[in-house]
Amino acid sequence: MSEQEVVQQKPESQEKQTAEINGEVVELEPPVKEGQEEANATQAPKEEVNQDGSRVFRAASSTIQLYRLYNPNSGEHFYTQTTGERDNLRKVGWRYEGIGWVAPASGNPVYRLYNPNAGDHHYTLNANERDHLKKKGWRYEGVSWYSPKTGIPLYRLYNPNARTGTHHYTTTASERDHLKKVGWRYEGIAWYAVGNGQQSYEDYRLLGVKNYNQYALGAPSGCEGASLLQALQYKGKITNWSLRSFLNTIPKSPNGNPNNGFVGSPFIENAWTYSAIYPAPLTTWGKKYGNVQNVSGSSVNTLINEVKNGNPVVTWVTINFQPIRWGNWNFGPAANNNHAVTLDGYNKAGNQVHVSDPISGSYWLSRTTFENIYNARKYAVVVR
C-alpha cells in the first residue's frame, strides 16, 4: 500500500475522518473488524462456467499442427490446421486448448463433415461413413488433414447423451479412459498422427486448489492461513497437515500491527481486534514450507500469468467481495471487512477468475469484480 495519511478532525467537529490511500481519498469508519456476521449477511458473487477439465498433452515437434478448441456452450471440440479459423472461433467464445496432435503433410485423407441441424462437426478416415452421413443431410467440407498408415493412435469416443460434440478424438490414453468412465463409448482408433500435441493455457486454466472452510474448522479469523495452506498443499507441501495444525505455527504480531505478524488468534473473532496478517509476515511464514514470494503491487494480469504457470496466489480482498470499508485503526487505515482467498483459475472467454474462498467455497466470479476489490490494496503472495 502506498503512503497513507490520516486527516484528524477536531474533537468537536462532526465531519468524518478521511485518508488518502493509493492516491484516492477514502472515508474512514470506526475500527470495527467484520467477520462471520457479515459473511452470513452477504453472498459471494458466484458465476456459472462450463468446465471441461484440464487436458494433458505431451510436447512434440511440428509438421502440420492440428489446433484443438472447445465450445463451453455446446460441449463440442473442434480441430483445425488453419490459424485463421482457430482465431475466429476464439473471438466468438471458443476456448483454445492447444495443439491436439501433429499430422503428416500427406497420407490417407481424413474427411470433415458438418451437421447444419445440430451444429456439430464429424471427422472420419472412412469414405463409406462420409458418404452415409452425406445422405443423412450432413454437409461435406472436404479433407481436413492426413493420416499415416501407422503411428500415434487417435482414439475416437462417442457420447450417447449429447446432441452436439457427440464424438471426441484424442491421442491421450488417460483422457480416453476418463471419458469411458463417465459414460462415453470407446469406438477404437480413428486414424494416426506423427506427433503428440501440447496444451495451451492461454484461454483457460483451473488448478482446483483444495478448499478449507474457516468457520467449519473453528478458525473464524484464519482466512490468510487457510488460503496459504490451500496453495502450499496444491504444490505438494505439508499435505498431511490440518488447518488447525498449520495455524498453530502462525507468526504473531508483537504490537497489534498485521504488517508484523498475525494480530490476536486465528481461532477467535471479535470486532475490536484486527485479526489479520499482511503479505510480508505471511511470506516469511510460508517460506518455511515452500517457495513463497511476496508479489504485492502486481496487476491482475501478472497474477493470472502465475496461475497460467500452475502457481496459486493468495490475494487480499473483502468478505464476499463486498465494497471495501476502511477503518481508522491504531496502526493506520485498514479494511474493516478484510478477507483473503486463493486465486486458482481464469476463463478468458467469460472474463472470469476462480477462487478458493475459506468462507464461501470454490467458485467463479467476474474478473472485473475481483479486480476492483483486489486493486484497492494489491496485496498478493504466490506459491511457486
Image (cartoon, rainbow, N blue to C red):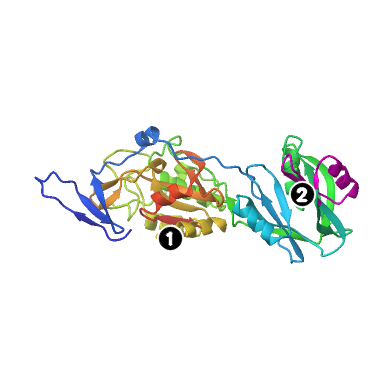
Depicted 120 relative to depicted 98: above or below: above
Category of crowding for the residue at label 1, using alpha-carbon neighbours closer than 10 angstroms: few (below 14), some (14–19), many (at least 20): some
Image spot of residue 212 (x, y percent): 49, 41
Depicted 279 relative to depicted 16: above or below: below
Depicted 337 relative to depicted 99: above or below: above
* In-front residue for pair 241/212: 212
Residue placed farthest to the left in the image? Answer: 12
Q: Residue at x 54, y 55 (%)?
A: 307
Magenta-drawn stretch contains 113: yes
Question: Which residue position is annotated with label 1?
Answer: 298
Image spot of residue 16 (x, y percent): 18, 46
Question: Which residue position is annotated with label 2?
Answer: 169
Depicted 179 relative to depicted 381: above or below: above
Category of crowding for the residue at label 2, using alpha-carbon neighbours closer than 10 angstroms: few (below 14), some (14–19), many (at least 20): many
* In-front residue for pair 375/80: 80
Circle 2 — which element?
Answer: strand
Question: Mark 2 or mark 1, which has the lower sequence index?
Answer: 2
Q: Give the residues drawn in magenta, as a range.
A: 112-139
